[in-house]
Amino acid sequence: MRFGRGLAAALLTCVTGTSIAEEKPLWELGFGFFALTSPDYRGSDESRDYLLPLPYIIYRGDILRVDRSGIYGRLFESDRVNLD
């Protein structure tokens, strides 16, 4: 049984070890939806449901990047210093 576990582990390592780097596009645009439930007024026992669109933009440039975490840019880069 011990040999079977070792063989299975080796095969799994070979399968997961080979991965191809996927090139991502420069621009990514899309939208999603989120639901919001809000009472008609404070203390009300009646409420309304809203389905609202939520657009998103992702830009993967060399200097400027925009994604979920925010907007940031690479201002200066050398072997010793990386200024973001």
Image: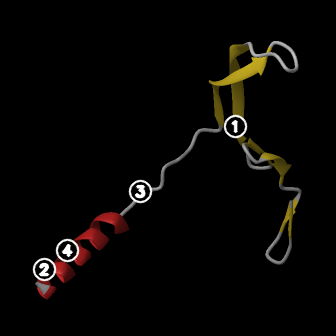
Residues at discs 4 and 2 in contact (Cβ within 8 Å): yes
Q: Which mark is residue 20?
A: 3
State the residue position of label 1: 58
Q: Quadrant of the C terminus?
A: bottom right
Structural distance between the alpha carbons of marks 4 and 3? 22 Å
State the residue position of label 2: 4
| Type of amino acid at the residue the image marks with label 3 | Ile
Give the foreground label among 1 and 4.
Answer: 4
Give the foreground label among 4 and 3.
Answer: 4
Structural distance between the alpha carbons of marks 1 and 4? 40 Å
Q: Quadrant of the N terminus?
A: bottom left
Upstream in the sequence, badge 1 or badge 4? 4
Q: How is the image coloured?
A: secondary structure
Residue at 53% x, 47% y is 23
Give the foreground label among 3 and 2.
Answer: 2
| Type of amino acid at the residue the image marks with label 2 | Gly
